[in-house]
Amino acid sequence: MDGQLKRGLLDVCVLAAIKNEDSYGYKIIKDMKPYVVLSESTLYTILKRLELANMLTVRTAEHDGRLRKYYRITQAGICRLEAFREEWREVMAIYQFVTREDEKND
């Protein structure tokens, strides 16, 4: 898969993982695991990129005597998810066009 495409897909996956509630690194990885495998180093690179793009905010809170970073989606992040849904409709239309011959030959 094209690196840029995969990067964009992983970004929206992380945004989707925190869409309904604030979350932290380990939980994000666990929530995404049934759909996509993501290493901690890759996740934290994505989280930093999304923070710099103002698509999420970070707060630190104590949990079991340790500090934990919690991530919250911003309005810009929600807008990115909505834009992705629109873009995906176009991708699916292209996919259907590209694979239409395969369907005829089956």
Image: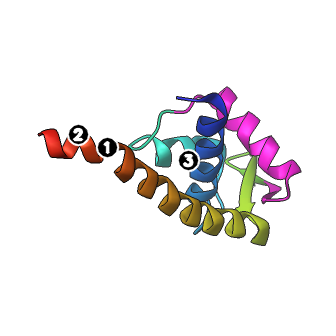
Q: Residues within 10 Å of mark 2 (few under 14, many from 20)?
A: few
- Residue with the mark numbered 3: 27
Q: Which x, y percent locates residue 87? A: 58, 60
x 28%, y 48%: residue:
100
Q: Contact (CB < 8 A) between labels 2 and 1?
A: yes
Q: Quadrant of residue 18?
A: bottom right
Label 1, label 3: how far apart the Cα atoms are: 37 Å
Q: Which x, y percent locates residue 92? A: 43, 55
Nearer to me, 64 or 11? 11
* Residue 63: assigned label: none
User: Is label 1 or label 3 in front?
Assistant: 1
- Element on which disc 2 rests: helix
Q: Contact (CB < 8 A) between labels 1 and 3?
A: no
The kind of residue on which mark 1 rests is Thr
Q: Quadrant of residue 56?
A: bottom right
Q: Which x, y percent locates residue 39? A: 58, 28
* Magenta stretch holds residue 89: no
Tell me: residue 1, above or below residue 56: above
- Element on which disc 1 rests: helix
> Which residues make up the magenta segment?
38-60
The residue sitting at the left extreme is 106
- Residue with the mark numbered 1: 99
Q: Quadrant of residue 8?
A: top right
The kind of residue on which mark 2 rests is Asp
The kind of residue on which mark 3 rests is Lys
Which quadrant: the C terminus?
Answer: top left
